[in-house]
DNA sequence: ACTTCATATAAATATTTGTTCATATAAGTT
DNA sequence: AACTTATATGAACAAATATTTATATGAAGT
């Protein structure tokens, strides 16, 4: 197992970040939409977005004042699905 | 995402525990074999094994003085594989 | 029964990670 | 240009997690 893989796993293994990924699964969102839906502080969301971006899971683009985030690749959904399946099986 | 799923993810998202899972993928192992191969303290390995067991990923049985650990279910490998694939793709 | 080997556990400590708080930046508005 | 809105960042703080240390347990051998 590489360092990269570990970082990816750790990045996904956080409730807030996992929720963000699930949201982005439905489509592009700006930071304020994410904080509103998850009801968390702006700064906190921002930190988590940075973490997700750092390990390549999401991308962003500016649109006027807002910054829109999206999943870097739909294949991320496979991981999320797999995790859900496994969890239901074991826990 | 449920609490259970999160706990599962967190459990796998640790280098030592991930390595243990990869070892057990090859077959049943006793604690001393695991500590020898990973070159970590007995007590540390023991703690990690407990964590893995707690979230249902591994099982154990006694065999004389030794205690043998194994994966609870081969479908765990699917998760490990998926993680590896994703990591190589993104990071 | 005593000793040794294999493993577990609890408490103490160290390290990592998440959260908040205060401040900065950058685009759009007035 | 000053102000507001949207987001980012760094430092301080809090919480969670991993590691170590010391000790306990339980089976097997003498």
Image (cartoon, coloured by chain):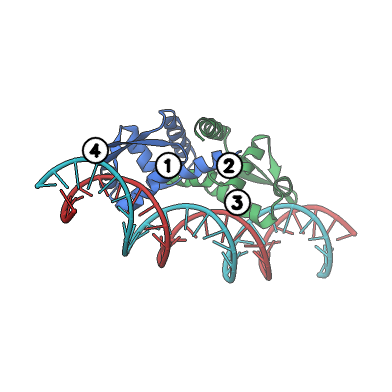
Chain colours: A green, B blue, C red, D cyan
Mark 1 — residue?
B52
Left or right? Give the position of D6 relative to C10.
Answer: right
Give the SS element for disc 2. helix
**Rounded to the nearest whole Å, what is the CA distance between mark 4 and mark 2?**
37 Å
Q: Secondary structure at mark 1?
A: helix
Mark 4 and mark 2 on one chain? yes
Is label 4 in a helix, a strand or a loop? loop
Subunit under mark 1: B
Determine the image quadrant of residue C12: bottom left
Residue A36 vertical position relative to residue A43 in the rendered view, above or below: above
Element on which disc 3 rests: helix
Residue to which mark 4 is pinned: B64
Residue found 64% across the figure and 35% down from its top: A25
Precedes in sequence: disc 1 or disc 4: 1
Q: Between label 1 and label 3, give the one nearer the viewer.
A: 1
Q: Is residue A73 visible?
A: yes
**Residue of label 3:** A48
Instruction: Choose between A91 and A26: the one closer to the eye.
Output: A91
Label 1, label 4: how far apart the Cα atoms are: 22 Å
User: Please, is residue A41 above or below residue B52 in the view?
Assistant: below
Residue B23 screen position, x and y as percent: 32, 38
The CA span between labels 3 and 4 is: 48 Å
Tell me if mark 3 has few (under 14), some (14-19) or many (20+) residues whose alpha carbon lies within 10 angstroms of its own. Answer: some
């Amino acid at each position: 197992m590489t360092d990269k893989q570990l970082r990816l796993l750790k990045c996904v293994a956080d409730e807030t970040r996992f929720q963000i990924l699930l949201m982005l699964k439905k489509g592009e969102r700006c930071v304020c939409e994410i904080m509103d839906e998850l009801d968390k502080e702006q700064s906190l969301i921002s930190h988590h977005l940075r973490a997700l971006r750092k390990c390549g899971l999401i991308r962003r683009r500016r649109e006027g004042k807002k910054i829109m985030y999206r999943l870097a690749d739909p294949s991320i959904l496979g991981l999320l699905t797999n995790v859900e399946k496994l969890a239901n099986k074991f826990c």
